[in-house]
């Protein structure tokens, strides 16, 4: 059977774990050099004096085959001497940054201090890890995502997720910093020159939401004329992991593939949903979207490649 044509280059909007797993599959289907990951930096924060970029590092470590497979983030086999020693000094150490992971973040911090931008630092890190896929931060400006909780308390997203364990009382998500940020060098070009744009199966509110909020991103996606395909991060009516359910509820969106498709419908052309949610496909088609139903659980790279194949085959048809 002849291989189907591939719409390359592919630009992807990416969060952390869900996106990283998908990208691992995508780079089995098309050349890694034909893929650019535009990554959320709304979760970035300083911890222990270093600039931590959770989503950039999850994507880099996963594509390098070095991610901790159990946690889905951090480096496999890392040690935690640094946070343990800091804890003995009485520091808060709820953010468990591994020692080698700390070195990545320390390197990033030193690069930034020497005048490099976050895009350049990210590129150097991915090359050092031997990753061929281009990885770009959505912006070089600080864009912290904050979450408002019942009672009006506002916290940084990492405090909500990691320190507080993602309680179910989100009333609003504040992306105003991303709305004021400039896109990082290369972001708009990657979108405008793409032949397919894929919204990875990531948290729609706090991973994809901040990227879309950066001025110019939505316009560049439309200007590309490329087919835009999203993959549902909701499987069987619930997130595979993480607090997407709590955040979707917080912004008044149904926790379902249909809810996510509705959130994206204005700017996407097609939607891949999981076979466990197949009964929703007619509702999503009624949104004027092309639909494909597959098993989207990315248990391994082969399964992820099947999801990527489905997304690209939809893009070819458009
Ligand atoms: P985070 O920043 O690490 O939370 O990463 P993302 O935003 O990229 O990923 C979180 C989302 O990925 C969650 O909503 C998950 O449901 C989704 N996700 C993770 N693994 C899978 C999978 O195997 N299949 C699908 N369809 N979604 C997944």
Image (spheres, helix red, strand yellow):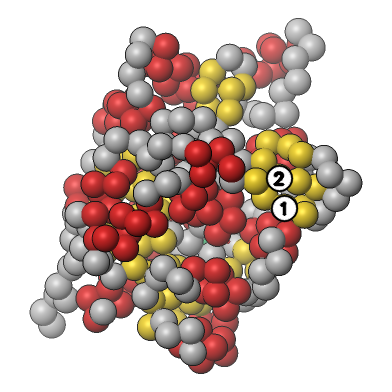
- Would residue 253 appear left or right of 148 to someone viewing this image? left
Q: Between residue 59 and residue 196, name the one nearer to us.
A: 196
Q: Position of residue 243 (x, y in %)?
A: 68, 55
Nearer the observer, 273 or 179? 179
Q: Position of residue 28 (x, y in %)?
A: 26, 58
Secondary structure found at label 2 = strand
Question: Residue sitting at 50 percent across and 26 percent down?
Answer: 101
Left or right: 91, with 208 as reference point = right
Residue at horizontal 30 percent and vertical 31 percent from the top: 123
Q: Which residue is mark 2?
A: 147
Query: Do residues under tags 1 and 2 come within 8 Å of each other at their CB atoms?
Result: yes
Write down which quadrant ligand 1 falls in.
bottom right
Q: Is mark 2 within 8 Å of ligand 1?
A: no
Q: Secondary structure at mark 1?
A: strand
* CA distance for labels 1 and 2: 6 Å
Q: Which residue is identified by label 1? A: 172
Q: Is residue 2 visible?
A: yes
- Disc with the residue nearer the chain's start (1 vs 2): 2
The answer to whether 23 is drawn above or below residue 225 in the figure is above
Spot the residue most to the right. Answer: 151
Position above or below: 188 against 235: above
Up the image or down, 217 lies above or below 74; here it is below
10 Å neighbourhood of mark 2: few (<14), some, or many (≥20)? many
Question: What residue is shown at x 45% (from left), y 17% (from top)?
Answer: 109
Looking at the rendering, in which quadrant would you find the N terminus?
A: bottom left
Q: Position of residue 45 (x, y in %)?
A: 58, 28
Q: Residues within 10 Å of mark 1 (few under 14, many from 20)?
A: some
Residue 299 seen anywhere in this rendered image of the structure:
no
């Amino acid at each position: 059977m002849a291989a189907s044509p591939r719409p390359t280059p592919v630009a992807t909007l990416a969060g952390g774990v869900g996106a990283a797993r998908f990208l691992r599959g995508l780079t089995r289907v098309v050349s890694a050099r034909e893929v650019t990951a535009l990554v959320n930096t709304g979760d970035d924060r300083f911890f222990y004096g270093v600039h931590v970029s959770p989503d950039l590092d999850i994507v880099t470590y996963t594509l390098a085959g070095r991610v901790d497979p159990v946690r889905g983030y951090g480096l496999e086999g890392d040690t935690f001497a640094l946070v343990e020693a800091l804890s003995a000094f009485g520091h808060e150490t709820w953010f468990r940054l591994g020692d080698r992971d700390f070195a990545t973040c320390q390197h990033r911090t030193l690069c930034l201090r020497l005048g490099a931008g976050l895009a350049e630092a990210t590129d150097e890190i991915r090359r050092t890890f031997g990753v061929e896929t281009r990885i770009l931060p959505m912006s070089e400006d600080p864009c912290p995502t904050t979450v408002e909780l019942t009672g009006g308390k506002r916290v940084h997203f990492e405090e909500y997720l990691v320190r507080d364990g993602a309680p179910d009382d989100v009333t609003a998500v504040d992306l105003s910093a991303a709305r004021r940020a400039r896109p990082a060098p290369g972001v708009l070009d990657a979108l405008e020159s793409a032949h397919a744009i894929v919204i990875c199966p990531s948290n729609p509110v706090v991973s994809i939401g901040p990227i879309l909020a950066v001025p110019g991103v939505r316009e560049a996606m439309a200007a590309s004329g490329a087919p835009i395909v999203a993959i549902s991060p909701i499987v069987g009516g619930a997130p595979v992991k993480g607090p997407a359910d709590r955040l979707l509820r917080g912004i008044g969106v149904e926790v379902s593939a249909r809810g996510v498709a509705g959130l994206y419908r204005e700017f996407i052309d097609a939607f891949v949903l999981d076979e466990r949610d197949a009964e929703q496909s007619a509702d999503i088609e009624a949104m004027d979207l092309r639909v494909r139903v597959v098993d989207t659980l990315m248990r391994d790279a082969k399964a992820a490649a099947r999801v990527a194949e489905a997304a690209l085959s939809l893009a070819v048809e458009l």
